[in-house]
Image (cartoon, grey):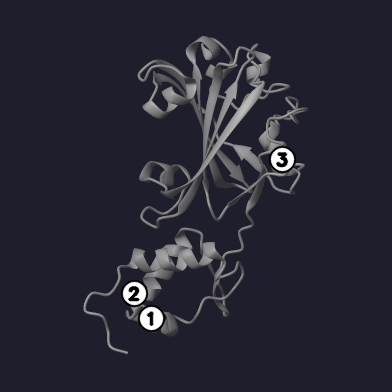
Amino acid sequence: MPQRTNPPPIREIADALEARIISGELQPGEQLPSTRDLASQFEVSEKTIYRVISLMKAGGQLEARQGKGVFVRSTKPLEWHLHQFERGSRRDDPVVGRDDWKAAAEEQGRVATQDTPRVSVEPAPRDVAKWLQIEPGTFVVARRRVRRVDGEPFQLADSWFPTSVALDTDLMVEADVTKPGGILSHIGYPQVSLRDEIRSWPPANPAEAERLELPAGLGTPVIRHTRIGYGHDGKPVRVMVTVAPGHLNTLVYEMEV
């Protein structure tokens, strides 16, 4: 087969292979086609394919097994049961530092941790202002976290709160704080109703990719889950945006009809 005049760049081939993994065409644990076959398929040199494989091994999509070849890494997605999350009798346990999200992950036999939150007081971006029903630029408290499953970043969970709710409370503490019923309930602003907005999104931007420890330029598709929590007066007390790489997270809703 003749070589292309302008063969696809390494990251373009990596994107194509990652798309096959995400779609299920290449299953976790499945062996990758030979370097020769891939070179023929993408009309590039075997040296280029070696570089693609090295890039994807560094990014965690592929793994080499000595004497056997290169395989799709077996990463089991987390099921995030959104119909249960933060509802009813929560599973928070302050004694062991387990909040509702960690408890749900541990019920699936996973080890769930969260990086130390980063907290700041900052002007609300336009989308956050819309969700919190305030004017853009109004100061809000931002609390940003990386959620890990089995030691690997699975989600970014960034929350914003009105200053009237969060200032001088545990929401300002840069620590993995756990309270019975959640921090908002503990400080007197319980969420009594929720609104979820879910969108598929283009690949993670460079800042998100860095926080999720994804290789820059690989174009990992993400899901953006936005949850707005409302208090007794019907006003928003929090908005949380969760950025979840599509191949690591399965969003689940179950309901009676």
Would residue 48 be visible to someone looking at this image?
A: yes
Label 1 packing within 10 angstroms: few (<14), some (14-19), many (20+): some
Kindly state the secondary structure of the residue where label 2 is placed: helix
Which residue bears the numbered disc 3? 104
* Rendered view: 8 above or below 77: below
Viewer-nearest residue: 94 or 232: 232
Q: Name which quarter of the figure residue 228 lies in.
A: top right
Residue 39: assigned label = 1
Viewer-nearest residue: 101 or 239: 239
Given the image, on which type of amino acid does mark 3 rest?
Ala
Q: Is residue 204 left or right of 226 when viewed as pictured?
A: left
Which residue bears the numbered disc 2? 48
> Which comes before the other along the chain, label 3 or label 1?
1
Q: Is residue 33 left or right of 181 when viewed as pictured?
A: left
Given the image, on which type of amino acid does mark 2 rest?
Thr
Mark 2 vs 1: CB contact within 8 A: yes
Given the image, on which type of amino acid does mark 1 rest?
Ala
Residue sitting at the far bottom: 1
Q: Comparing marks 2 and 1, which lies closer to the viewer?
A: 1
Residue 219 image position (x, y, % from top left): 40, 55
Residue 102 image position (x, y, % from top left): 68, 37
Mark 3 vs 1: CB contact within 8 A: no
Determine the CA span between mark 3 and mark 2.
Answer: 42 Å
Residue 186 image position (x, y, % from top left): 68, 15
Determine the CA span between mark 3 and mark 1.
Answer: 43 Å
